[in-house]
Image (cartoon, rainbow, N blue to C red):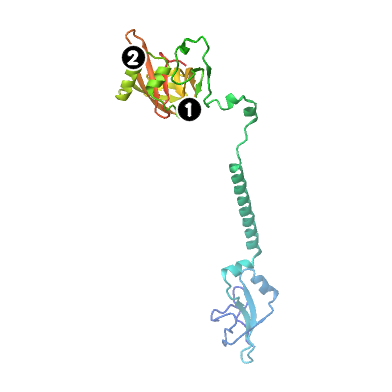
Amino acid sequence: MKTGILDGRSGYPELNSRAASANTCPHCNGPVRRIHRRLPERLLSLFHDVRRYRCPSESCGWRGLLGAPKASLWSSAARRPTVWAIAGVLALLLVAAFWLAYAYYERARAPEQPSAQQLQMPAAQVADTEPIGGRPLAADDPRRIGSSPLGEPLRGCVWGGAGQRPYVGTMTTALTAAQLPADIVTKMTIMRDGGAVSDRLEITSAGIHSVDYQRDFGYTVKAITMDGSICFDSKINPPSSSTGTADLYELVDAKRQRYAVMVVANGGNVAVLEMPGGR
């Protein structure tokens, strides 16, 4: 009876490379039948997958080991417990990532709750950048003399900056309501209509100042138009992220009295500025 040739290195029948497949006898090329492996051969399969076969032909009678048929990558991996363990860990990580992403999305979508400190603040402190209306002038205030073209004048307003409570009236109406002399009102109107701007101003949380920071008009104005009213002795209080621009018109009368008027680009508010500037 013929048996597989012994490999001198391992002592086991060699894996004949002439075989076309694991189901072909390497001696007669006839079909072979698989038989049980011995213990040493099972240990060998831990390093190289082999199977034991015999040739049923009486004229051959070959017995020996042949390499197992090559399986596909996926089917081979599916038989390994390590692969399944790694796949399970990756699946758990993927589920955890989806859960964290969903939790982050829910937190981002939920409205922000005010802090305990904010809840204890007065309303004016929580929203101190919002424009606040003033109060009527006192009955004996000299600025009540005559009728105002903008209704009952107010005082002590807080203006929230460019774009807040815009004014849609004319410059003449605004300066008349602010009680500037008639000749100054006329000259200021001519200056604006002719584009004779004295300077450019910025309105920020740092106050009203020229764009080159050479002049500072502070945080208060003598008078300012808001909506359809005029408010004296008012304060500006824009948010820190807000920046507005305005044109400045200046005149000096025969008595050396200086007048400075600001016209806001965004909102059209007309303000009579303090001279000199101060906070």
Q: Which residue is mark 1?
A: 165
* Residue nearest the observer in this picture, 7 or 16: 16
Q: Residue at x 61, y 48 (%)?
A: 102
Question: Total label count?
Answer: 2
- Please indicate, yes or no, whether residue 197 appears anywhere in the rendered image: no
Vertically, is 82 above or below 264? below
In the picture shown, does residue 232 fall above or below 269?
A: above
SS of the residue under disc 2: helix
User: Viewed as shown, does residue 91 lie left or right of 236?
Assistant: right
Question: Which label sits in the foreground, 1 or 2?
Answer: 2
How far across and down, in percent of the image, does residue 187 sit? 32, 17
Residue at the image point whose x is 61% and y is 56% from the top = 90
Q: Nearer the viewer, residue 179 or 245?
A: 179
Q: Position of residue 4 (x, y in %)?
A: 61, 82
Q: Residues within 10 Å of mark 2 (few under 14, many from 20)?
A: few
Q: Is residue 44 left or right of residue 171?
A: right
Q: Is residue 117 visible?
A: yes
Quarter holding the N terminus?
A: bottom right
| Residue 268 point in image, percent of width and height | 41, 27
Residue lying furthest bottom in this view? Answer: 59
Residue receiving disc 2: 183
Q: Tell me the kind of residue under disc 1.
A: Arg
Extreme residue in the top direction = 255
Position of residue 157 measured from the top left corner of the image (x, y, whole percent):
51, 20
Residue 86 vertical placement versus 123 (above, below) = below
Q: Earlier in the sequence, mark 1 or mark 2?
A: 1
Residue 79 against residue 60 in the figure, above or below = above
Local secondary structure at mark 1: loop
Q: Calculate the distance from the C-alpha at mark 1 to the C-alpha at mark 2.
A: 28 Å
* Residue 203 placement, left or right of 28: left
